Structure formats: structure tokens, C-alpha cells
Image (cartoon, rainbow, N blue to C red):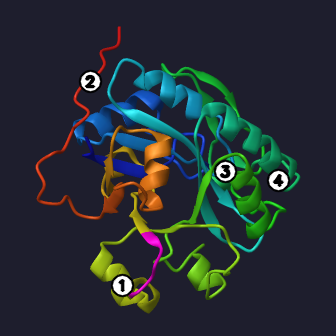
């Protein structure tokens, strides 16, 4: 039986240099569950080192955590890359790290890049230049992520900054994507971009949360058999009855993640 699930597929942690210090694993988890979100994706800038921590914090709850990354590609565009498992995103991370610009992060300029465990203990600070574009093209990144079983789509195309439609003016025909992400309500995004009025791409709306209070401010509803990566992938591709919606449909078959963990 297919049910509707609520998802926010673009969330940062304290690892992102622009992420607030409130974005630790426990706080992200508590906020997502309080706001009745079923599925989240952790998508830090050019790194996935805190994905495991959020997954660990979510153990024992009904919240599904998708492994992901927001990559700042050479063309000046942000793209979302989601993966079926932690091992896939960590393999992808090696490729991204190999193409990062050389240098050491200036915390006073870009912000701290904190790696933590599921209990929010600080393990280290990532000194790489995660805030800058990597030396790999949009096409190359999308192709490699696809080889690893990933889902790839341009981030916040309705914004002025880092949007593929603002930077390039178009989406290359040979780019292997099935979706685009917006941050504004659909009507506002369509007002800003005529492209969104008749596109065949699945439209994903997500919060791009850098502050804990913003988690779930924008979300997408997925009609799935279960909250899993493979089901999300089918919904984005509109396969086997799986689909997406930007507003909760009238159908009453909707399942919330209700289990909120307690910590000692």
C-alpha cells in the first residue's frame, strides 16, 4: 500500500561553513520529528562527514535519513546529490575531496566546519575549503554520482545565487537529471521563472536549512510504499504509482514519524 510521507531533502549541519551551531545531529532530529517530517537528507557543502552522525542519532526512531551532499561545481552552480547508502556517499566524498581547491579554511571568513558524533561531541574541525567551488564540472559530478547509484538535481533554481538557471541560463539536455529543486512556494517560483510553469522535471521543494528553526519550512510529499531511497528515486521518476506533491493531497493515507528519542 502506498502512503504519503513528508520530506525535507536539503538540510545542513554544523559541518557546513554557513551552518549555525544549532545544527547538531540531536537538534536536527528533534526538530524534524517535532515538525512531523518522515524523511530528511543531510546535504552539507562538499562533504558528507556528518551524515553518519545524524543517521546514528535517528536510530530507534521512524525518521529516515538519506545520505547526501550539496556540491558546488566548477560552473558556480549548486547541485544536490543523494545516495542509497552511507558507503556510496563516502566513496563520492573521496572524489569531491580530490577536486577541492587547495588551501586551509579561514574560519573567520567562511565559518567553522565541525565534525561531530551522534551525541554532538566534537570530533574535529574540517580544515578543507568546503565553501569554494570544486575543480570538477557539473557534467562530471552528475555522471559520477549516477555511477554510484545517486540521484542528482540542481539546487534552488528559483534563487539568484548558485542556480543553474541563473548561472547558465539553461539545463543541458545531456545532463542525467529528473528533478529540479525550488525553495520558494511553487507559485512564487513560477512567477520568478517561466521555465517552471511547463517543465517536465519533477519539482522538489526543500528548506536548505542552515538554522534548526528552518527545518521543514519547505518540504515535498512523496507517495511511497516505504520511506527509502529506492522509493524516493521511483517517485522522482514517476514510476510504479510513486509520485510527489508540493502540497499534501486530500488523500488521508499519511504517515508521520512520531518516535522522539530520549537522551541520558
Mark 3 secondary-structure assignment: helix
**What is the tally of numbered marks visible in this picture?**
4
Q: Is residue 246 above or below residue 50?
A: below
Closer to the camera in the image, 82 or 108: 82
Q: Give the x, y percent position of residue 207.
A: 39, 57
Mark 3 = which residue?
Answer: 108
Residue 192 image point, x, y percent: 40, 87
Residues in magenta, as a range: 198-202
For residue 260, the mark is 2
Say whether residue 200 is magenta.
yes
**Mark 3 or mark 2, whichever is nearer to me:** 2
**Badge nearest the viewer, 1 or 3:** 1
Q: CA distance from mark 3 to mark 4?
A: 20 Å
**Which dot, 3 or 4, sits closer to the camera?**
4
The disc at residue 53 is: none
Whether residue 149 is visible, yes or no, is yes
Amino acid at each position: 500500500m502506498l502512503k504519503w510521507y513528508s520530506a525535507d531533502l536539503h538540510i545542513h549541519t554544523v559541518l557546513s561553513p554557513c551552518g549555525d551551531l544549532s545544527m547538531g545531529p540531536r537538534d536536527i532530529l528533534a526538530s524534524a520529528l517535532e515538525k512531523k517530517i518522515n524523511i530528511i537528507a543531510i546535504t552539507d557543502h562538499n562533504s558528507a562527514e556528518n551524515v553518519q552522525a545524524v543517521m546514528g542519532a535517528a536510530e530507534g526512531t521512524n525518521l529516515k535519513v538519506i545520505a547526501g551532499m550539496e556540491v558546488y561545481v566548477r560552473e558556480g552552480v549548486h547541485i544536490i546529490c543523494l545516495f542509497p547508502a552511507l558507503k556510496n556517499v563516502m566513496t563520492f566524498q573521496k572524489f569531491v575531496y580530490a577536486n577541492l581547491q587547495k588551501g586551509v579554511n579561514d574560519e573567520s571568513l567562511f565559518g567553522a566546519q565541525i565534525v561531530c558524533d551522534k551525541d554532538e561531541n566534537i570530533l574535529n574541525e574540517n580544515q578543507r575549503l568546503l565553501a569554494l567551488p570544486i575543480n570538477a564540472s557539473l557534467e562530471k559530478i552528475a555522471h559520477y554520482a549516477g555511477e554510484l547509484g545517486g540521484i542528482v538535481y540542481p539546487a534552488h533554481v528559483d534563487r539568484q545565487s548558485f542556480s543553474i538557471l541563473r548561472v547558465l541560463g539553461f539545463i543541458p539536455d545531456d545532463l542525467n537529471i529528473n528533478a529540479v529543486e525550488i525553495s520558494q512556494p511553487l507559485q512564487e517560483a513560477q512567477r520568478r521563472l517561466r521555465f517552471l510553469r511547463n517543465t517536465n522535471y519533477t519539482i522538489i521543494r526543500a528548506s536548505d536549512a542552515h538554522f534548526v528553526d528552518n527545518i521543514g519550512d519547505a518540504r515535498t510529499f512523496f507517495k511511497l510504499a516505504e520511506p527509502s531511497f529506492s522509493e524516493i528515486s521511483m517517485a522522482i521518476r514517476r514510476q510504479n504509482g510513486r509520485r510527489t506533491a508540493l502540497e499534501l493531497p486530500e488523500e488521508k493515507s499519511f504517515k508521520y514519524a512520531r518516535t522522539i528519542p530520549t537522551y541520558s
